[in-house]
Amino acid sequence: MPWYRPGPGRYRREADAALTRRRRVASNDAVTDGDRLDLDRLPPHATANRAYWTAVAPAYAEAGAREWASEPSWGIWGIPESELHLIDDVEGLDAIELGCGTAYVSAWLARRGARPVGVDITEAQLATARRLQEQHGLAFPLIHASAEDVPLPDASFDLAISEYGASIWCAPERWIPEAARLLRPGGRLVFLVNGTLLMLASPDDGSVPAADRLLRPYFGMHTFAWPDDGSVEFHLGYGDMIRLLRSCGFEVEDLRELQAPDGATAPVPHVTPAWARRWPSEEVWLARKRS
């Protein structure tokens, strides 16, 4: 699973740019930059994250292959879907994975009877996803686009989902309104992110585990930039996230604060199992678009 490192940030609100591209993708053909992704229109954080994920994509190919071949499990601790029940009722649903990476979540959805579409800004990640589609004989559309500006029509989906995809790598004031646009009335939004307490208790050095005290301010958290690799993450406090979701037409149905299971081992350096047994290192937000 990805290695996410928190750092100091500031909260800012942006007005979302008008979205102009509204095309439905009906095939699994490769999508080129010139066809779907206008690089000149990307905001700086999207350009930076695209470059970062292009560089590290080979390191995630093996993990993607494992996830494609496994039963659904969530987050860095691999909590089984049978415990969380995030996607157990998706039969017949049109679903979109925002920031799909190697598209293993979309593969899980397809095997459970959904009709998924994966969206990602990084060609190298989508190339891995296509190889795994061929390997597993499982085809669904993959779109080369930013999750902040998806070239698909309004109200096309019943479920929008993100596990450490758009949920942390895209500006929330851009991707959450876009998810709302793509969903039909009554559609669900499910996204997994780093725990708020983990972000506040983690030092700037991502190789050092989270502390047992708060190290940074809660008020104003928003943008987390990493000068060593140029990537940019986004994390909101609880109140800001609830207000943003409601302003986009969502009702918050649940917030799952994930606890490391007994006997868990440390898959990442920034949080220990002992820490994650006491405090939530990950959160899953579940919301529904108002009818």
Image: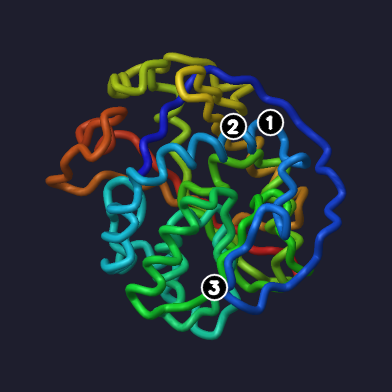
Vertical order, 207 against 43 (above or below): above
Vertical order, 88 against 241 (above or below): below
Which residue occupies the extreme left position in the image?
A: 263
Amino acid beneath label 2: Ala
Residue 253 visible in this rendered orientation of the protein: no
Amino acid beneath label 3: Pro
Sort mark 2 into few (<14), some (14-19) or many (20+) by Cα contacts within 10 Å. some
Residue carrying label 2:
48
In terms of image quadrants, where is residue 36?
bottom right
Sort mark 1 into few (<14), some (14-19) or many (20+) by Cα contacts within 10 Å. few
CB atoms at circles 2 and 1 under 8 Å apart?
Answer: yes
Amino acid beneath label 1: Pro
Vertical order, 61 against 86 (above or below): above
**Image check: 129 left or right of 239?**
left
What residue is drawn where x is 43% and y is 14%?
Answer: 215
Residue carrying label 3:
116
Image location of residue 277, percent across then percent down? 25, 38
Sort mark 3 into few (<14), some (14-19) or many (20+) by Cα contacts within 10 Å. many
Image location of residue 87, percent across then percent down? 44, 70
CB atoms at circles 1 and 3 under 8 Å apart?
Answer: no
Labels 1 and 3: the sequence-earlier one: 1
Image location of residue 150, percent across then percent down? 71, 58
